[in-house]
Structure formats: C-alpha cells, structure tokens
Amino acid sequence: ATNRTFTMIKPDAVANGHIGAILDQITKAGFKIVALKYTALPAEKAGEFYAVHKERGFFNDLVAFMSSGPIVAAILEKDNAIEDFRKLIGATDPSKAEEGTIRNRFAKSIDANAIHGSDSDENAEIEGNFFFSAFERF
Ligand code: CMP
C-alpha cells in the first residue's frame, strides 16, 4: 500500500553540503515529498523527539549531536515507504551500510549518520506530527 515515512537530514550531512544530493537520491528512488522544512532541533526538542532512547547510553550524545546545527525534516510518500526507505538509507552504523546507500555515501559514524528514517507506520505518524501541521503537508 502507498504509505508515508518521516526523515531528517541530520546536522552532519547539512554541514557537509549534502542536502541537495540526498534529496535527489530520495526523489530518484521514487519517494514523493509531502512536506519539507529546513529547521533545527534545540536540545529540549531533541530530547522529546528521542524520548524512546532516554535510558540508552548514547542518549546525551545523540541529543547534543542532533541539536548541533540545522536539519532538514520531511514526510515522504511511496508504496512500502517505511521498508523501502530504510533500505535506501542503509544500516544505522555506516560502516555496515550497503554500497550506494545514503549512509554509505554520506555518513561518517553511528552518531553522525547523515539521515533518519522512521521504523514503523506508527512512528512515522508521530514523528511527522512533531514537525508539521496539516497545512504544511501536500
Ligand atoms: P536513528 O535511528 O536515526 O535515531 C537514533 C540514533 O541514535 C541512531 O540513528 C544513531 O545515530 C544513534 N546511535 C548512537 N549509538 C547508537 C547505538 N549503539 N544503537 C543505535 N543507535 C545509536
């Protein structure tokens, strides 16, 4: 079924000038951009966004990194969006990401891993709602 996922181009990929190349790879893979925003996640907001990881050892580093610079947030639509997008971005750890995936091309480390992709329909909905109002989706 056609469905949606949520993504963020993370501060490392923005700082390294990869916004255009990443959006190009996403749209060429057949994803339609439903919503798009150049914004930032202040530490408090980053903590809220990643609340599910609160108890993990990497939580503080994750919040610090995600609030270190601007990001690009987007909602994407495609058949089988969640699974296909996770394939397109590659493994969380870029050293394990397949050749040609977005993390293989643009990410440097498990923290600075260039891009986020929702892991379920339910989380895509929650994460999209975190950044976008109804008037910002097309
Ligand atoms: P993402 O899945 O987008 O959101 C959680 C992030 O935590 C993940 O990307 C990684 O960038 C980061 N992270 C750091 N260390 C780990 C780890 N050991 N396991 C999973 N995620 C990690």
Image (spheres, grey):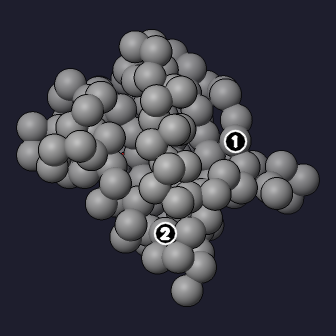
Mark-to-mark CA distance, 1 and 2: 16 Å
Please tell me whether mark 1 sits on a helix, a strand or a loop. strand
- Which residue is at the far front? 28
Q: Tell which circle, 1 or 2, labels the residue nearer the N-terminal end.
A: 1
Say which residue label 1 marks.
36
Along the line of sight, which residue is nearer the eye, 28 or 93? 28
Question: Marks 1 and 2: CB-CB under 8 Å?
Answer: no
Q: Which mark is residue 81?
A: 2
Q: Which residue in the rendered view is the most extreme toward the right?
A: 135
> Where, quadrant-wise, is the N terminus in this rendering?
bottom right
Relative placement, left or right, of 79 versus 116 is: right
Label 2 element class? helix
Where is residue 56 shown, x and y percent of the image? 23, 46
Q: Residue at x 83, y 49 (%)?
A: 136
- In the displayed structure, 72 sits above or below 121; it is above
Which residue is at a point 49% across and 69% down the rendered structure image? 81
Give the residue at x 26% y 32%: 105
**Three-letter amino acid code at disc 1?**
Leu
Q: Is residue 127 above or below residue 111?
A: below
Residue 44 visible in the picture: no
